[in-house]
């Protein structure tokens, strides 16, 4: 919401608050393409390297500590997990890519399913590409970005764990990523900086997601 009119920004934040105040419940976990549910609502997917903090961020957004499973062990999310948010949106927690403590066969299986989902999902409105604020973009992130560009799937960079880095280093990381994103046609120009632990940027991310949700039913 950089540069937005203050009144518009306030309305967007309120829309985000109201959406994420709605009930959010687990729908299904998919291990194979034939287990993916029908795309009946707009979907927002969360992708990122293993241990980037995807599940923690989903829990912070929804205000539910155990909605998505969290772990200090990379690779614990090995399925595509779907959550219905107020009947207006589906949140999709994707398996992490990169390092994971799992067999090569298992990694190959969930990586293939994730790519199948990202490249061909009709209801997918945006991918939140999570990037550890301490480390910035890595080769695995750039590979996923190129894939999303090729599939014309909109994605937005969301920095996680912002509380674990100093302000100067964080600002430099944001600047570097902005310059890189400018070369990618499917990338949303605004970078969101978040911390699931401190609550930084959670309201702004809720607002960005709410703008893509199905309209609230008329009363």
Image (tube, rainbow, N blue to C red):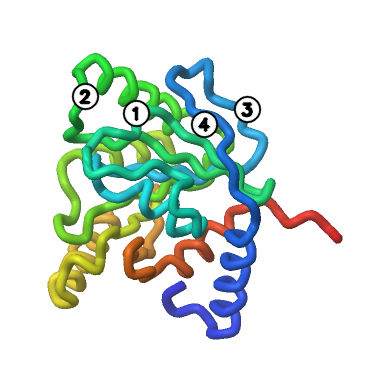
* Left or right placement of residue 26 versus residue 194 in this view: right
- Secondary structure, mark 2, is loop
What residue is shown at x 16% (from left), y 46% (from top)?
Answer: 138
Q: Residues within 10 Å of mark 3 (few under 14, many from 20)?
A: few
Q: Are marks 1 and 3 in contact (CB under 8 Å)?
A: no
Q: Nearer the viewer, mark 4 or mark 1?
A: 1
The answer to whether any part of residue 162 appears in the image is yes
Among numbered discs 2 and 4, the one appearing first in the sequence: 2
Q: Where in the figure is residue 214, as x and y percent of width and height?
A: 67, 51
Residue at which label 3 appears: 38
Q: Where in the figure is residue 25, as x and y percent of width and height?
A: 59, 43
Q: Is 147 above or below relative to 211? A: above
Q: Residues within 10 Å of mark 1 (few under 14, many from 20)?
A: many
Residue at which label 1 appears: 78
Marks 4 and 1 sit apart, C-alpha to C-alpha, by 19 Å
Q: How many marks?
A: 4
Q: Which dot marks residue 36?
A: none
- Secondary structure, mark 1, is loop
Residue at which label 4 appears: 121
Q: Nearer the viewer, residue 188 or 101?
A: 101
Residue at which label 2 appears: 102
What residue is shown at x 59% (from left), y 84% (from top)?
Answer: 7
Among numbered discs 3 and 4, the one appearing first in the sequence: 3
Q: Are marks 1 and 2 in contact (CB under 8 Å)?
A: yes
Q: Nearer the viewer, residue 23 or 206?
A: 23
Q: Are marks 3 and 2 in contact (CB under 8 Å)?
A: no
Marks 3 and 4 sit apart, C-alpha to C-alpha, by 10 Å
Q: Nearer the viewer, residue 179 or 7?
A: 7
């Amino acid at each position: 919401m950089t540069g937005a009119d203050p009144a518009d920004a306030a309305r967007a934040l309120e829309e985000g608050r109201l959406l994420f105040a709605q009930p959010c419940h687990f729908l299904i976990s998919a291990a194979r393409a034939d287990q993916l549910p029908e795309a009946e609502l707009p979907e927002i997917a969360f992708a990122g390297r293993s241990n980037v903090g995807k599940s923690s961020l989903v829990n912070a957004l929804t205000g539910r500590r155990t909605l998505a499973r969290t772990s200090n062990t990379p690779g614990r999310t090995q399925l595509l997990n779907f959550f219905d948010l107020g009947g207006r949106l589906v949140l999709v927690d994707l398996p992490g890519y990169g390092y994971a403590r799992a067999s090569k066969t298992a990694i190959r299986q969930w990586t293939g399913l994730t790519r199948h989902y990202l490249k061909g999902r009709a209801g997918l409105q945006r991918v939140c590409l999570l990037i550890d604020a301490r480390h910035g973009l890595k080769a695995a992130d750039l590979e996923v970005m190129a894939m999303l560009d090729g599939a014309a799937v909109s994605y937005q960079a969301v920095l996680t764990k912002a509380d674990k880095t100093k302000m100067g280093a964080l600002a430099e990381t944001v600047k570097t990523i902005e310059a890189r994103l400018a070369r990618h046609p499917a990338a949303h120009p605004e970078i969101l900086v978040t911390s699931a632990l401190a609550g930084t940027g959670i309201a702004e991310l809720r607002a960005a997601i709410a703008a893509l949700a199905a309209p609230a039913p008329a009363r």
